[in-house]
């Protein structure tokens, strides 16, 4: 049985009900681990929640497995990915006592690209209705569509009315020309197809695809940071992603193919030891900052072979730290340059939030503070209940962000024709425009 959809269509999320409880399943496929979460989303009054949230989230099922078959977010072995997905989803289903059929999944691969597209429509001086907003938003979104790339997110950054900029919500206002600046985040289609196919092979359907930087930012940033301007940096195993939020909206996203695994590989090569031993040495002895007495302390390095006669070698702890620091500083310098090139450096201001499993390296936040020349804190998932203690750290930010995403999915537009009947019937869709024409003509 095939669940795969035509290449021209990306899955789109159905709106959350604001009257009844919803069960949501999410899947975070990373280079180091695969996490499946099943959550119960209960609608509540906004005053009881963080800004922008409409539902209370309670995690009722959690499963995670070591990731196999991925390299820097790109699928290299579909069978291995399918197996990891099956095991993680099965564990979450057993814990929750429910069966998952469709889920929300994150996307890191596909050369994520952020662009701003502008469009305008003539109003003729009448009041701005929902159809007018849909028309201008869809026109800007279509500018970002291409045959080889798929739109993951399309969010209005700001509206203009008769040349006046910075209008948050022009609905109900009067004017002649309505314009919009749309932030369009796209990815190559081929890696998305492979990702969806791997999940389909586990007899699951993809309900929505969410860019990893967007998800981790949703989970790790507090509302004041997102409003004033802040960058969230998610340091994973194979990739590090950047998301920039201003006025509560995602305005830029980027990814680089460097992460915690690269530090482990450097240690394995530099110390001539196995990857598992290099990972343990990184966690226990590695530091992104110089430490007192590190050249006097000696640590034992297990040999790489299986021969019992091979004896462990002994090296100063300072050598481990120097190998770690070289890769960490290279990564942070690249992130600094990417933020500068984005054009949003001034809007980010002095606020950086580090999240992701690799952000837990000793001394990383202090090193980031020095190289990025900004205030840095470690971000953990916010506003979710039911998480076990082991899943409350920064390594689970992306999975929690995927659980938050359904509450903000309605802010997006994907252009007519992207989502089947829902896009046709929704605001600005073909059926909606036909109804609008009938109303205006008769």
Image: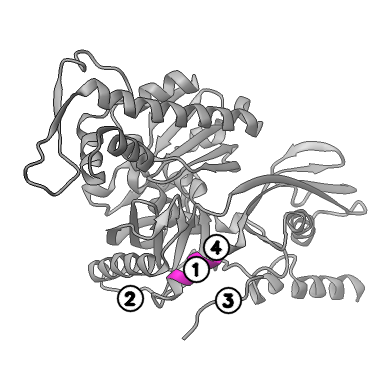
Q: Secondary structure at mark 2?
A: loop
Q: Position of residue 430 (x, y in %)?
A: 77, 73
Disc on the earlier residue, 4 or 2: 2
Q: Position of residue 75 (x, y in %)?
A: 45, 60
Q: Position of residue 148 (x, y in %)?
A: 68, 61
Cα distance in 3D space between marks 4 and 1: 6 Å
Give the residue displayed 21% in from the left and 16% down from the top.
295
Give the residue displayed 44% in from the left and 44% down from the top.
50
Q: Are marks 4 and 1 in contact (CB under 8 Å)?
A: yes
Q: Are marks 3 and 1 in contact (CB under 8 Å)?
A: yes
Disc on the earlier residue, 3 or 4: 3
Disc on the earlier residue, 3 or 1: 3
Circle 2 sits on which residue?
Answer: 99
Work out whether residue 55 can be spotted: no
Circle 1 sits on which residue?
Answer: 196
Report the residue that reaches farthest toward the top.
Answer: 292
Disc 1 packing (10 Å; few <14; some 14–19; many ≥20): many
Circle 3 sits on which residue?
Answer: 5
Give the residue displayed 48% in from the left and 43% down from the top.
257
In the rendered structure, the answer to whether residue 276 lies left or right of residue 99 reads left
The residue lying toward the viewer, choosing from 295 and 423, is 295
Does 243 lie within the magenta span? Answer: no
Circle 4 sits on which residue?
Answer: 192
Q: Are marks 2 and 3 in contact (CB under 8 Å)?
A: no
Cα distance in 3D space between marks 3 and 1: 9 Å
Query: Which portion, as a residue range, is magenta?
Result: 193-198
| Mark 2 vs mark 3: in front | 3
Q: Quadrant of the C terminus?
A: bottom right
């Amino acid at each position: 049985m095939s669940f795969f959809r035509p290449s021209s269509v990306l899955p789109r999320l159905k709106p959350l009900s604001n009257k009844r409880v919803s069960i949501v399943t999410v899947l975070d496929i990373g280079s180091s681990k695969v996490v499946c979460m099943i959550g119960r989303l209960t609608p509540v009054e906004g005053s009881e929640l963080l800004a922008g949230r409409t539902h209370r989230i309670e995690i009722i099922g959690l499963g995670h497995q070591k990731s196999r078959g991925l390299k820097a977010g790109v699928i290299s072995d579909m069978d291995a990915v399918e197996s990891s997905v099956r095991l993680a989803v099965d564990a979450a289903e057993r814990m929750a006592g429910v069966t998952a059929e469709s889920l929300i999944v994150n996307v890191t691969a596909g050369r994520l690209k952020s662009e701003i597209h502008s469009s305008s429509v003539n109003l003729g001086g009448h009041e701005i209705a929902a159809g007018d907003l849909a028309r201008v938003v869809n026109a800007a979104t279509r500018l970002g569509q291409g045959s080889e790339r798929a739109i993951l997110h399309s969010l209005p950054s700001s509206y203009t009315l008769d040349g006046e900029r910075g209008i948050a919500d022009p609905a109900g206002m009067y004017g002649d020309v309505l314009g919009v600046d749309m932030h369009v985040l796209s990815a190559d289609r081929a890696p998305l197809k492979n990702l969806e196919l791997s999940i389909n092979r586990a007899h699951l359907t993809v309900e929505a695809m969410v860019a990893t930087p967007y998800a981790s930012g949703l989970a790790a940033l507090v509302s004041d940071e997102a409003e004033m301007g802040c960058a969230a940096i998610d340091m994973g195993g194979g990739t590090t992603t950047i998301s920039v939020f201003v006025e509560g909206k995602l305005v830029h996203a980027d990814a680089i193919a460097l992460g915690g695994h690269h530090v482990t590989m450097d240690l394995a090569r530099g110390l001539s030891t196995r990857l598992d031993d290099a990972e343990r040495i990184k966690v226990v002895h590695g530091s992104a900052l110089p430490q007192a007495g590190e050249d006097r302390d000696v640590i034992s390095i297990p040999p790489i072979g299986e021969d019992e006669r091979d004896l462990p070698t002994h090296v100063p702890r300072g050598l481990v730290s120097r190998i770690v620091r070289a890769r960490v500083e290279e990564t942070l310098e690249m992130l600094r340059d990417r933020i500068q090139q984005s054009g949003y450096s001034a809007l980010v201001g002095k606020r950086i939030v580090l999240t992701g499993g690799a952000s837990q390296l000793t001394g990383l936040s202090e090193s980031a503070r020095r190289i990025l020349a900004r205030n840095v804190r470690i971000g953990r998932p916010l506003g979710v209940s039911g998480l076990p203690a082991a899943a409350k750290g920064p390594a689970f930010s992306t999975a929690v962000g995927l659980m938050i995403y359904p509450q903000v999915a309605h802010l997006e537009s994907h252009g007519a024709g992207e989502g089947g009947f829902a896009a046709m019937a929704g605001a600005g869709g073909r059926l909606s425009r036909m109804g609008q024409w009938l109303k205006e003509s008769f």
